[in-house]
Amino acid sequence: MPQYKLLSRKAACNTHGQDSSYFLGWQEYERNPFDPSTNPTGIIQMGLAENQVNLKLQYGQIFASVFIRASMQLSFDLIESWLESHHDAAGLRQDGALVFRELALFQDYHGLPDFKKALADFMGELRGTKVAFEPDKLVLTAGATSANETLMFCLVDPGDAFLLPTPYYPGFDRDLKWRTGAEIVPIHCSSSNGFQITKTALEKAYRHARKRHLSVKGVLITNPSNHLGTTTTHRELDILLDFVIAKNIHLISDEIYSGTTFAVPQFISVMEALKGRNEGDVSDRVHVVYSLSKDLGLPGFRVGAIYSNNSAVVAAATKMSSFALVSSQTQHLLAALLGDKEFTRNYIAENKKRMKRRHDRLVRGFSSVGIECLKSNAGLFCWMDMRHLIRSNTFEGEMELWKKMVYQVGLNISPGSSCHCREPGWFRVCFANMSVATLDLAIRRLGEFVTTGRAWRQH
Amino acid sequence: MTSGSSEKSAAKDSTGSPATGLGGGSGMQLIVPLQGVVQGSGGIVLGSLIPCALFYVLQLYLKRNRSPSPPPSPSDDGSWETHAISRSPSRNVLSPRGSSGHAAVSSRASSIAKSGGSPYFVGSRKCSEDPYHPIDNPDGVIQLGLAENHLSLDLIGDWLAKHMKDSVLNEQRGLGGLSISRLAAYQPFDGLMELKMGVAGFMGQAVGGSVSFDPSQIVLTAGATPAIEILSFCLADPGNAFLVPSPYYPGYDRNMRWRAGIELIPVPCRSMDNFVLNIALLERSYNQAKKRGVKVRAILFSNPSNPVGNLLSRETLHDLIDFATEKNIHVIADEVFAASTYGNEEFVSIAEVMNTHEFDMSRIHIIYGLSKDLSIPGFRIGLIYSFNEHLLAAASKLSRFSSVSVPTQHLVISMLTDTKFITEYIKMNRERLRVMYELLVNGLQQLGIECAKSSGGFYCWADMSKFMKSYSEKGEFELWKDMLNLAKIHATPGLACHCIEPGWFRLCFTTLTQKDIPVVIERIKRVTYRH
């Protein structure tokens, strides 16, 4: 009997927001993953790799992968030792007594008060206490993925658009649009000014959206930026605020990398830039998304948050969070961890040191083989300029180079086209999810490719 | 409405056989009217605008035509309680929606934010403001509207106390350890395979071994609530409808309407049938919907039933599947109370029926979770179980928005792996449910209140119609208020569950101790003596 396939349009629209190029790379990585001892000639994972179980693509079935995305592996040991010495928190206890009963039954979408307070305080600390976050304005969700989608449901009706500066995280094409029916219109940024957001670019994007008869509801930025690895400057934040005030639209600042700023200039949250500016009630239209996946390296915990001054947004988002509540056990554990301010301060400081070291090593190494990266001070990745290595200044040229990288050099890095970058030849490379030895090997391989013009491994 | 046209325009499926439209079992097509459009360069705008415009029009139509239906119902759990919005919504929200660019919140958000102002939320609020406690507050409000099972938490607490004594970071998962290296990386969004295996095993134990559930047919989600929403997004387009036998769980109204935009069409069940689904009524509801131009995509039912607690027989399940096959629609079985049965009747999972008959399995989907059967709603573990690989593929993608927290997954894996404990737990829990159920039912009987025959779940479904001043919705509402204000008991009124016969109330007995039962009965007397 033929299989029954009567699914919704959304379910059927498999290709939504997916770029085949980096799935191909990921698949290649899966087939031939690098391992220093068992497979030293395998592909090193340095790129964007989506975690898609049971995903049917044109290239076939792909199963769960080990390495994902920009993941933070530099500072596990710190969290590990904290957990070792804090049995209560992980063991569902408080002051020695088992609080299992309360936690097991706790499913209030307002969240565990202790946890929200600890999270709000932590967010404030990350911003050098220049901004205070109130727990009542925080909505907890199972990860930033869910926070972004929930915020979209709150701010857009199907067919409305949001403007995003390029390059942007490819996952947005899916997370922001899939079920919400929203559209994304890119704000094209260029290398001529280090990919910074300009008033001209914003206006252009807005006009473009209007031409497509899309109602623009807001702008979404990632600060620090994914994929650039830079913090948004004060000037850019002012330009953005001016823009959303003038157009009477929203501004979402996805600040999930805020704790990864390892060098100057300091991270400036949009909430800080908002201080002293409330023309047209703009503070009602500025929202922050946060998560512990990047800053604390705990993506599996699924802890995300929306922060908003807008009570209607908070009310609606809180109810919608029913579909993505954070496990009470996790809230309890993290309330203790985040509440240990000495630990968090030490962790953030130490993590930044390690990241800076790793970042510098990568940048120096790549520079020594003739590849420069955009000057960056945050994030878990670098934005590499490989324009001089592509055969033609086109995206076909970029793809060709990318394929060489994956199949011949054995490095899986993300091509700029997959994140809507307008200029061919830029690639994103992650540095926080591998050992030093692996990084050095990657640099060596790259060097061989560049200098000899030949692949280190003939195909 | 244009619901009919998309059916006919279905593309050929991958095997090349042409669409045959409604009715035929063979040639069921994957409806992908937008796929070709989206892939073309010019089509993106049209491809997104046309359905969006239709969606808009539909929303307006529905808004205008909605009769003064019952206000958004309180759900089982306390998290439905809303605090009044502390300041009035910003003026942008109230500004005319027609003007583009005005930074109002979305219309979805507006209606969701407003929901919860209904009188039924008063009940939940009163419970939290003045909660009953046998010693500290014997005159407080007794909460019988919340489906939490307190009866067997001690068993789980004991297990945890014994097994989490050891190092938290124990690499051996059998001791519930949090292995940091496993925590560090992203894990599959639809859940760890070990947890899928553990839950599949639990489900098998819940049905007494009559079915063996396949872990690879599971997509895990943060609770059954997102499971059902994801299923809705995958099986239906906004504006489509599900047939739901009523009375039904009030939370469905939220789960499927809010964002997925599914209309729920109640199929009234009658007390004379002990509220068991009548296929003839199902047929009638289907035809009525069709006449209105509404496209029905699925039947959704809970079994064991919330609120009634009855079980569906094998025959009824067969009939349901036959009906769905004939109409070419899906069947969604919400079986979250499968292990919480206590009567003499045997619970039959729809999966069991599937095994024994030649049905097209790809239209059957099960919703399950550990919130009810294992009393751990806070940990957020739910799932979709399906026989449809395309559905599973789509659902597992969407599970990224509602993933289960990894440390919790590990904890539960270790618990479920202890099958001896689980068997004991299920057995003891059932016994305790039975005892409490019978105590309450007998107590109510003394007052002249009869309950529907229940064999599972956490509730008595009580007929209090004789105590209403008038046999009407208004009468029921007045009685509900008296229960809350005079008897200081918060119970769920039948109207909240879309029951067609006024006067039925849902009383949860799993938050009570045996000593509380006489207190509850005495309280209810304050109301029954007056009428």
Image (cartoon, coloured by chain):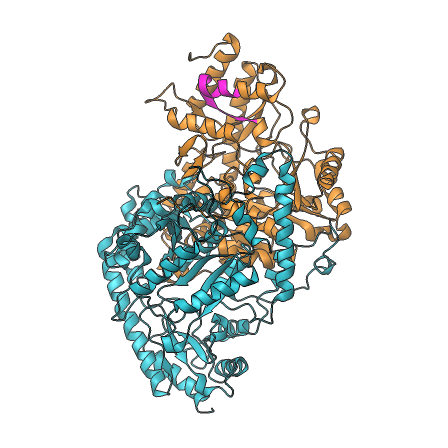
Chain colours: A orange, B cyan
Residue at (42, 81) in percent of width and height: B138
Q: Is residue B519 left or right of residue B37?
A: left
Instruction: Answer above or below: position of A145 versus B1.
Output: above
For the image, the number of numbered tags is: 0
Q: Nearer the viewer, residue B92 or B138?
A: B92
Q: Is residue B331 left or right of residue A417?
A: left
Q: Nearer the viewer, residue B59 or B8?
A: B8
Q: Is residue A233 magenta?
A: no
User: Is residue B165 something one can see in this rendering?
Assistant: no
User: Is residue B201 something one can see in this rendering?
Assistant: yes
Q: Position of residue B185 (x, y in %)?
A: 42, 37
| Quarter of the figure with residue A190 | top right
Q: Position of residue A290 (x, y in %)?
A: 56, 45
Q: Nearer the viewer, residue B73 or A285?
A: B73
| Quarter of the figure with residue A320 | bottom right
Instruction: Answer above or below: position of B141 versus A249.
Output: below
**Range of residues picked out in magenta:** A402-415
Residue at (47, 91) in percent of width and height: B531
Q: Is residue A411 magenta?
A: yes
Screen quadrant of the N terminus of chain B: bottom right
Q: Is residue B262 left or right of residue B132?
A: right
